[in-house]
Image (spheres, grey):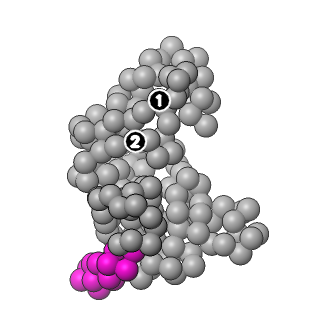
Amino acid sequence: MNYLIRLAVEQRGGDYLSFPRRALFDKLGMRSVVIETDPYGDFLTQGYDFAAARDWARLGNLYLQDGVWNGERILPEGFVRFVSTVAPAWAADGRLIYGGFFWINGDGDLPIPRDAYFMAGAGGQLTAIIPSHDLVVVRQGHYRGAAIGAESLKKALALLVSAVPAR
């Protein structure tokens, strides 16, 4: 996918390596983001991107606002619906947990509403978008193994959702 983005940016005469900063991060005020590249210079945006919690919250808020930031449409119309809807192959398997590049709470595994969708990092990082509560939750941290910290994360999410009334 990232190679296709590179081709599109370069075909329009743009500079691929500065594209994410100009087209997204600067507009959202995200100042700490670092995205690694593969040996060919293509961005690796599926787990090799680093940012401060505040910047992940800004990105989550962009999705919460249907891709519009300060009145400017940054994400294409319908993209938020795409990422927050279960992908057909996952639905066919009866696993309602993955959409378009985002995880989905379709199986209710997390104690948050099922309309929630989220970005999850390998070390337990989480940026959850919960539209029914107009809420974005960011969890930073590092732990080895998926099970460590899972119960405390679930408890914290349940407390946050109960503290913020649904819209």
Residue 61 visible, this angle: no
From the top left corner, tell me how far across and down residue 139 is, in percent.
30, 63
Instruction: Classify residue 165 as left or right of residue 146.
Output: left
Considering the image in quadrants, where does the N terminus appear?
top right
Segment colored magenta: 150-165
Residue on which the image places disc 1: 37
Answer whether residue 98 is magenta in the image.
no
Q: Which mark is residue 120?
A: none
Instruction: Using the numbered discs, state the Cα–Cα distance from disc 2 to disc 1 in whole angstroms.
Output: 9 Å
Mark 1 neighbour density, 10 Å: few (under 14) some (14–19) many (20 or more): some
Of residues 19 and 93, which is closer to you in this image?
93
Q: Which mark is residue 49?
A: 2
Please indicate, yes or no, whether residue 39 appears anywhere in the rendered image: yes
Q: Amino acid at mark 1?
A: Thr
> Which residue lies at the image location 40% right of the left edge and 42% below the top edge?
49
Q: Is residue 86 above or below residue 160?
A: above
Q: Which residue is nearer to you in this view: 74 or 24?
A: 24
